[in-house]
Image (cartoon, coloured by chain):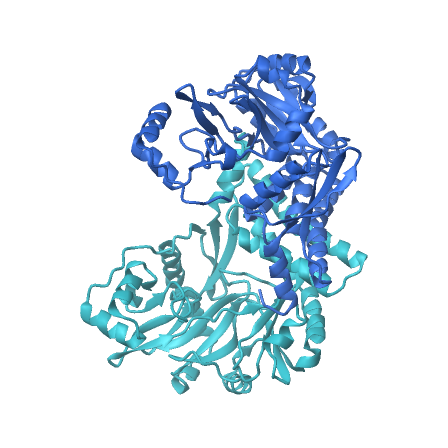
Chain colours: A blue, B cyan
Amino acid sequence: MIREGNEETDPEFIARLASYLGFDEKRVKRLFEKNYLARNWGKYEHLLRFDKEISHIERGTVLYEKDSSFEIIMGFPKIRRAMVLNPTLKRHFSGLEKVAVEEKMNGYNVRIAIVEEQILAITRSGYICPYTTQKAKEKLDLRFFDDFPELVLYGEMVGPDNPYVSKEIYGIESVAFYIFDIREKNTGKPLPISRRHEILKKYDFSQVRSFNEIPLETAAEEIGKIVRELGEKEHEGVIIKDPEMVLSPLKYTSSQSNCSDLRHAFKFYNETGRDFMLSRIVREGFQTVEWNENEIEFENRCMQLGESILDSLRKSIRSVKDGQRLYEEARIRVRDLKTAADFEEYLKRLGVDTIFEEPQSVGEEYLIIIKKINKSTNDKTQAIWQGEPW
Amino acid sequence: MIREGNEETDPEFIARLASYLGFDEKRVKRLFEKNYLARNWGKYEHLLRFDKEISHIERGTVLYEKDSSFEIIMGFPKIRRAMVLNPTLKRHFSGLEKVAVEEKMNGYNVRIAIVEEQILAITRSGYICPYTTQKAKEKLDLRFFDDFPELVLYGEMVGPDNPYVSKEIYGIESVAFYIFDIREKNTGKPLPISRRHEILKKYDFSQVRSFNEIPLETAAEEIGKIVRELGEKEHEGVIIKDPEMVLSPLKYTSSQSNCSDLRHAFKFYNETGRDFMLSRIVREGFQTVEWNENEIEFENRCMQLGESILDSLRKSIRSVKDGQRLYEEARIRVRDLKTAADFEEYLKRLGVDTIFEEPQSVGEEYLIIIKKINKSTNDKTQAIWQGEPW
């Protein structure tokens, strides 16, 4: 990640920013010094990003000057997880008659907004991804941003040509944007679900699948069924929302999604965070107890869990033993090779170690395979095969 | 753990200690301030312990004044793990014809030595455990310490009445001490294996099981067989040593031992270190690849792994759901209730949260069940069942 000294020296700018944020100037200075408030680079240098959550401003929030003041695009609010559906839903949504249930898709979170008359795709961390930006311009009806310049689309980029999280399961040929929230600039206030549906329909935007509204009383049971069905298709899970979007949403995922995360995590066992692995495993424990599984179901779950972990480990350990290097394969599809070059430069800037292969012509576009090198797991495994103790 | 301000103020003592250790005085002062060098308490207050590894002095090393200088009992040297037997053994022991193989028992590491005419049992961290000390006095032929006051026994306390790691698998009624090393005071130099055998035989001390010496050429294969056999009996694994004890030993463990660790770890999933869990899982990956297992063996291993993890999680999650508190049960057996009272005080001093139940008379001794409360996993699980998101 970018970790350059990024101290802002213009006292007038610091003063204005401090006044806008309601912080004192010393604090704003310190945020810059610690890189908690950092700049994008190149032509986006004037876009500041919060690299850390500061006083309820989400990490990934983007901020820039506008009309002698500032404008903010709030980050993705963290969505808390229901470890068990019952009683968590009843407690969290108490007072509501019904909750809205939407599919949680497995892709890459992106905000799309118009900033100084340019359409930009902003990543979860607040970077401007040139590839995602280009795809958004190609795939979305941009008249939306003319009509609603003060709104931001919060969505998921999914499909096989998504270089971050590539999935074939949604039947998408290349990539598509599924919008799950629309929020106002500055306040970050979300539109009620019905209003979001209305707008998205008008511009023919893809929406995440909706399971309609479910009475809170029976929600745990019905969502349990939905998640089991989604799991059978290797889909991830659901987001449970207040239809008015006043109470914060909750998420809940399928066993297959947990296991899929584990398969990926253990492939690169020396890279992935320990907390990431453990939390997926613990979810399996709660789900089997909450769903009161019998011994056959439980054995299946044990086998799934064991295999997700060990099969990935085995593959990686074997590959290195056989002299291969471990890498993660990703793929992009571009109309213009300039987009690929920009994306390569962007990843380099972020410190991601990649190899871009030769572009292959596909119709009027180019497919480019990207290999992300996982150095730490690779080196560790190789050292062990060379006789290094742990 | 003890974390009191422990600054030593006597400049003459600091000066002498610095000169003995070959450190400068400022450094010794800082070691005390940071509690890296700390005191035991009560009647053992004059025994200093290294709470951290400092310049090749092992963590747990104990140091005290003697004859106007100092004497040191070195800590347990860390034993590195062979993740794969081949080529690790050949590389680590290169130059040796044969390696000695001994069983690694599953118990509690303890050093037993005579210090100022008292027999003391010193834990891995350098504390004086009153229970272990009393057991050592009862179980060992103490004439050894009269004959060899300059030697320290490095062993494992095993059996069901071991309150730290209780195991029934060794067919021991209460507790026994198995000696795996004898080392000199001050230098920490170990005796060659043959000399250790000789001495232990003379005093009728229990030795860890020896698999004799194995040619280095065939060691990986033969040790693989030994470890599989040990695993079938739920035994832990082996330590592989240079018979002369010049090169450092290596360890290697059975799949059953990894899974047993995981069973324990996931029972208290919010307490046990993430690194601890992950390392056990990764070992399973290397073992299945090194042993070139077929698909049936691999499936068994997946099932074992999955079950070790999930069954423990399920039990804990269910228990809390049913309103029970999670605890770990331990047991001690004492002749004199004073030993139990001292041990209770000792655990309290170490910050371990325990409940000692009423003593039960067994022959001329008392059995006392100890419940160690695992607050963190307990509270987390309870909160989830009350509807708290993760």
Judge from the rendering whether residue B231 lies leftward or rightward of residue A83; answer left or right.
Answer: right
The x, y position of residue A257, in whole percent, is 68, 38
Q: How many marks?
A: 0
Judge from the rendering whether residue A49 lies leftward or rightward of residue B67; answer left or right.
Answer: right
Which residue corresponds to the image point at 62% horizontal and 44% vertical from the top-left? Answer: A281
Residue A130: image quadrant is top right
Which residue corresponds to the image point at 78% horizontal and 39% vertical from the top-left? Answer: A361
Judge from the rendering whether residue B334 lies leftward or rightward of residue B210; answer left or right.
Answer: left
Which residue corresponds to the image point at 43% horizontal and 78% vertical from the top-left? Answer: B188
In this rendered view, identify the residue nearer to me: A92 or A311.
A311
In this rendered view, identify the residue nearer to me: B267 or A181.
A181
Which residue corresponds to the image point at 73% horizontal and 62% vertical from the top-left? Answer: A322
The x, y position of residue A298, in whole percent, is 72, 42
The x, y position of residue B62, in whole percent, is 36, 70
Residue A290 sits above or below residue B186 on the image: above
- Whether residue B235 is visible to the viewer of this picture, yes or no, is no
The x, y position of residue B365, in whole percent, is 46, 65
- Whether residue B275 is visible to the viewer of this picture, yes or no, is yes
Which quadrant is home to the C terminus of chain B?
Answer: top right
In this rendered view, identify the residue nearer to me: A368 or A277.
A368
